Image: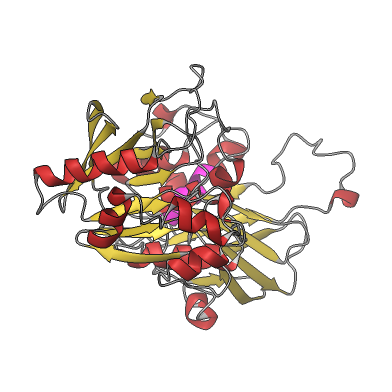
């Protein structure tokens, strides 16, 4: 069946020979047993299969490692792509207006792995391009053969969302399916030749089709035009994937001091143009504190989480002030200067009875991040107050403490803690 699917792919390419199928992306499981030389010679490099010979001879064929490739020694032998690691089969390349990143799910790819930090840098540097991510086991598919990969959801989807990946291509399930998540299209292109799986109708999908098939994309600088094509040439579906727009300016979404008072964790809405693993001293220039000294900073693989180390440790039940300035996202959008006041939590052994005084909970944030009890929405309130021309005494006195948005944020904390009045009290 693989040769038959390739035959239809070549026929489809012949319709517009200068525009179609110049690049073939394989979603993994090239052979039944990737550690056996005979499998590669009979299933992929078989001279008796004319369509396969024509495809490999005339088209650029690139792909991901599947679970059937074993340790991938033979795959790397026959397909010496520009692998980043001597053991992991992951790499990336540009092809016209698209940037293709191939992930290896069979070496470590958790968020603190070597592959994850490479993936973050790779996607961060792919500006003004349509991004396509390829890996074998799908994050979102139609069930039936295999469930959605928990590892892919936990460790790869954050990169998809942080860096504006337009299309994710996977295999593993032997059929065609498409799932839309947060404006990204997750395509399962697994109908290449193995016995088919039956999609589970209980899975929420945009499209699922039990057929030998392939996915086709016509690429322009602004969009990908996608089709699902069966082995007999009939069309499964057609859709358009626009290039994701540049990100909006970053904002702090959550912030907290961890128990012990030595570490502060900040979560951002957008990936930051900062790599603290390469230059910690430069990254520290963006952060200040009024308590002790910030001695180190680290940034997550997705560039959306920052961890600051404070020395000496901040005391429990005291407020720790953190200033944030000069940060930009991957597209150069600047974040406004922020002044955060975070309550240092008590250690669990020091507060066995919990918070019984009716006051603030541990890890409360005096900022535009999340509130413990959700009784206000600080980002909206702060925007409204800063634009309202409000000149009530409370706001005026607070502005001596900090400037601009920081004063508004501090005012919101006072408002919640001391004077629970309506929005109409300050008009």
Instruction: Say which quadrant the N terminus sits in.
Output: top left
Residue 405 within the magenta-colored segment of the rendering:
yes
Q: Residue sitting at 10 percent across and 42 percent down?
A: 15
Q: In this view, does 153 lie to the left or right of 18?
A: right
Q: In this view, does 259 lie to the left or right of 390?
A: right
Residue 77 within the magenta-colored segment of the rendering:
no
* Most foreground residue, 57 or 259: 57
Q: With respect to residue 217, does 129 lie above or below? A: below
* Most foreground residue, 86 or 33: 33
Q: Residue sitting at 24 percent across and 48 percent down?
A: 243
Q: With respect to residue 361, does 344 lie above or below? A: below
Residue 257's x, y, as percent? Answer: 67, 57
Q: Can residue 66 be seen in this view?
A: yes
Q: Residue sitting at 74 percent across and 74 percent down?
A: 312
Most frequent secondary structure within the magenta stretch: helix
Give the magenta part as a residue range: 404-413
Residue 110's x, y, as percent? Answer: 61, 57
């Amino acid at each position: 069946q693989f040769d038959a699917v390739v035959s239809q792919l070549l026929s489809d390419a012949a319709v517009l020979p200068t525009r179609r199928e110049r690049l073939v992306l394989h979603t993994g499981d090239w052979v039944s047993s990737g550690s056996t030389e005979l499998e590669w010679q009979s299933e992929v490099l078989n001279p008796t299969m004319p369509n396969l010979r024509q495809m490999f001879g005339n088209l650029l064929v690139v792909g991901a490692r599947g679970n059937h490739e074993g340790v991938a020694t033979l795959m790397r032998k026959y397909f010496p792509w520009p692998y980043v690691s001597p053991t992991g089969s992951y790499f990336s390349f540009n092809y016209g207006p698209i940037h293709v990143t191939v992930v290896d799910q069979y070496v470590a790819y958790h968020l603190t792995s070597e592959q994850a930090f490479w993936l973050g840098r790779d996607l961060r540097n792919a500006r003004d391009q349509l991004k396509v991510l390829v890996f074998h086991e799908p994050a979102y598919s139609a069930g039936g053969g295999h469930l959605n990969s928990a590892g892919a959801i936990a460790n790869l989807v954050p990169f998809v969302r942080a860096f504006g990946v337009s299309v994710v291509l996977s295999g593993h399930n032997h059929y065609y399916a498409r799932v839309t998540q947060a404006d990204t299209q997750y395509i399962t292109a697994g109908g290449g030749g193995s016995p088919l799986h039956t999609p589970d109708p209980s899975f929420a999908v945009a499209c699922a089709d039990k057929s030998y098939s392939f996915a086709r994309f016509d690429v322009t600088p602004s969009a990908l035009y996608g089709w699902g094509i069966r082995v007999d040439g009939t069309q499964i579906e057609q859709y358009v994937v626009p290039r994701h727009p540049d990100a909006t300016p970053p904002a702090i979404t959550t912030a907290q001091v961890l128990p012990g008072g030595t570490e502060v964790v900040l979560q951002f809405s957008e990936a930051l143009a900062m790599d603290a693993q390469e230059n910690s001293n430069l990254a520290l220039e963006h952060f200040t504190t009024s308590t002790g000294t910030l001695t180190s900073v680290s940034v997550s693989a997705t560039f959306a989480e920052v961890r600051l180390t404070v020395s000496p440790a901040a005391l429990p039940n005291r407020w720790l002030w953190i200033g944030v300035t000069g940060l930009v996202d991957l597209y150069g959008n600047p974040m406004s200067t922020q002044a955060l006041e975070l309550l240092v939590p008590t250690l669990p052994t020091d507060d066995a009875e919990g918070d019984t005084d009716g006051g603030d909970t541990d890890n409360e944030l005096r900022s535009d991040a999340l509130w413990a009890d959700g009784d206000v929405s600080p980002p909206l309130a702060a925007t409204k107050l800063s634009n309202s021309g409000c000149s009530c005494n409370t706001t005026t006195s607070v502005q001596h403490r900090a400037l601009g948005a920081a004063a508004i944020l501090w005012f919101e904390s006072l408002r919640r803690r001391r004077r629970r009045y309506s929005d109409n009290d300050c008009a």
